[in-house]
Amino acid sequence: MTPLSLADRLNALLRRLPEAGVWCLGLIPLAWLIWQVLQGGPGVDPVRGIEHFLGKTGLWLLIACLVIPPLRLLTGINALRHRRAIGLLAFLYIVLHLTAWIWLEMGLYWSQALKDLWKRPYLFFGITAFLLLLPLAATSGRAAIRRLGPRWKQLHLLIWPAAGLAVLHYLWQMKIISREGWIWLTLFLALLVSRLISAGLRRKKLRCDSPRAGKPATDSPHGQAKLP
């Protein structure tokens, strides 16, 4: 009997991990943030600290959704069954990030929020990313997958522009882009290139595997069509 590889061991653990377990792990950062708030707030500016923590956690989880397919191809580690839960966790943190801005920073004054949008254009990128994620969260259930059929996969490609806009939102709010910001940008671009290459290879394989249009297969030199 050959020993199990690291990928096999991780896959066995991932198969045994229930969706509720993914949610429990994903809510640990939120629990830590609540504890920090009860202790006096994260950082010198608690409101800004809460906003940034929620936004960055949501962005990490969003990027994690994009990492799962290439991770399976490169290492054999298969976490696809948990991608839905991770995506919904990312959406939850992004909703909380937006709520913190509207409630804690703007005080629920919508006119002030609109003025803030005008002063800080990078907010448009964040709000647009949130709007793109809304239909993905709404159609994440099995019933929606069955109802939409092949269109479901096309709809969920919106995660790519949403993640790209979220990264731009994060970078633009910096006066000087930090090393962490460049890491976010490099990681997203690498994942995007990987996705485009993978999609191109799949299309090429489909073209090669499909029979030539208008030319039926034959089993005789006289061109008689081969019976199935």
Image: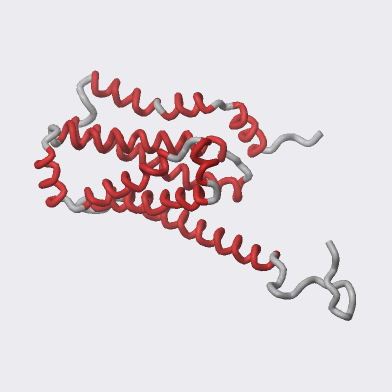
Residue at 61%, 34% in the rendered image: 10
Render colour scheme: secondary structure
Kindly indicate the quadrant of the structure image that contains residue 25.
top left
Residue at 34%, 24% in the rendered image: 32
The x, y position of residue 82, in whole percent, is: 53, 35
Instruction: Give the position of the C terminus as an image quadrant.
Output: bottom right
Q: Vertical placement of 131 versus 208: above or below? A: above
Instruction: Give the position of the N terminus as an image quadrant.
Output: top right
Q: Residue furthest right?
A: 220
Q: Vertical placement of 44 versus 171: above or below? A: above
Q: Vertical placement of 95 versus 216: above or below? A: above
- Residue 213 falls left or right of residue 99: right
Residue at 52%, 28% in the rendered image: 19
The image shows a total of numbered marks equal to: 0
The x, y position of residue 220, in whole percent, is: 89, 76
Q: Vertical placement of 192 versus 81: above or below? A: below
Q: Residue furthest bottom?
A: 222
Q: Nearer the viewer, residue 136 or 202?
A: 136
Q: Nearer the viewer, residue 44 or 210?
A: 210
The x, y position of residue 99, in whole percent, is: 24, 34
- Residue 16 falls left or right of residue 153: right
Residue at 78%, 36% in the rendered image: 2
The x, y position of residue 214, in whole percent, is: 70, 75
